Image: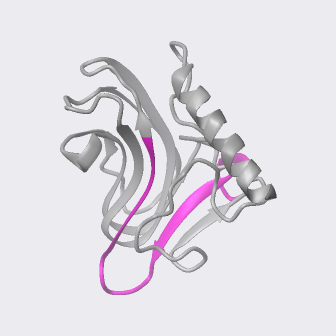
Amino acid sequence: MKFICRALAGAVLFTVALAGNAAGENLVVNGRFEADQTLLPLYWLHPERAKVGETVFFEQDRGPKGIPCVRYVNAGPKAESFGFRQIGYTLVEGARYRLSAQIRTKGFKGRGSVYVLTQGWTAEAGISGVPENSPWTLYTKEIVAPKTAFPKNYGVILHAHRFTGEIAFADV
């Protein structure tokens, strides 16, 4: 019962947060990855094909200056792809938005990105092109919301595509 109440309260807060962003406010809900005694950070969808505690880690104090972060690890020889996302954002097609995240890499080979994407991932806009090895670095990019037939269903994704090594994201 307690779980159901928390889930309902979270859904209401998520809906209110998406509906009420003023100019200059962060569009991403819980971009700090706060978990509040849950396995996954609140409002984020589980990465497909990833195993929590083996290939994806949610660490409450390992980000820059001790803030929470999400870290993808692939030590094997076969490249993997993971995406940690939020969906259901209403954006104005063609409008400008600022996207930012702190990203760290270690032996990373592949494509790491933070994107705003359309339903069905028919278009994207965002940050990509991270180096193989880098300390925590703030990436900021002004984007234009891609054209879509579903303006009430944009998403945000922290994506590592066909990668080996390690990439971590914080403060989205």
Q: Is residue 133 left or right of residue 13?
A: left
**Depicted 70 relative to depicted 96: above or below:** below
Q: Position of residue 67 (x, y in %)?
A: 70, 48
Residue 75 painted magenta: yes
Is residue 134 visible in this depiction of the protein? yes
In this view, 102 is above or below 16: below
Residue at 42 percent of width and 38 percent of height: 88
Q: Is residue 82 above or below residue 7?
A: below
Is residue 129 left or right of 53 when viewed as pictured?
Answer: left
Front in this rendered view, residue 158 or 136 = 158
> Which quadrant would residue 144 be assigned to in this image?
top left
Q: Magenta residues?
A: 61-87
Q: Position of residue 128 (x, y in %)?
A: 31, 47
Instruction: Please give the name of the residue rendered at 77% of the width and 53% of the height, measured from the top-left corner.
Output: 36
Question: Which of the pair 82/61 is nearer the observer?
Answer: 82
Q: Residue 66: x, y in percent?
A: 74, 51
Q: Residue at x 71, y 47 (%)?
A: 65
Horizontally, is 19 left or right of 126 in the view? right
Count of number-bearing discs: 0
**Which residue is found at the position 57% from the left and 58% from the top?**
70
- Give how far across and how far down residue 58 sits, in percent: 63, 63
Image colouring: one colour
Q: Nearer the viewer, residue 27 or 98?
A: 27
**One can see residue 66 in this view:** no
Residue sitting farthest toward the bottom: 77
Q: Is residue 143 magenta?
A: no
Identify the image quadrant of residue 160: bottom left
Q: Residue furthest top?
A: 23
Q: Quadrant of the N terminus?
A: bottom right
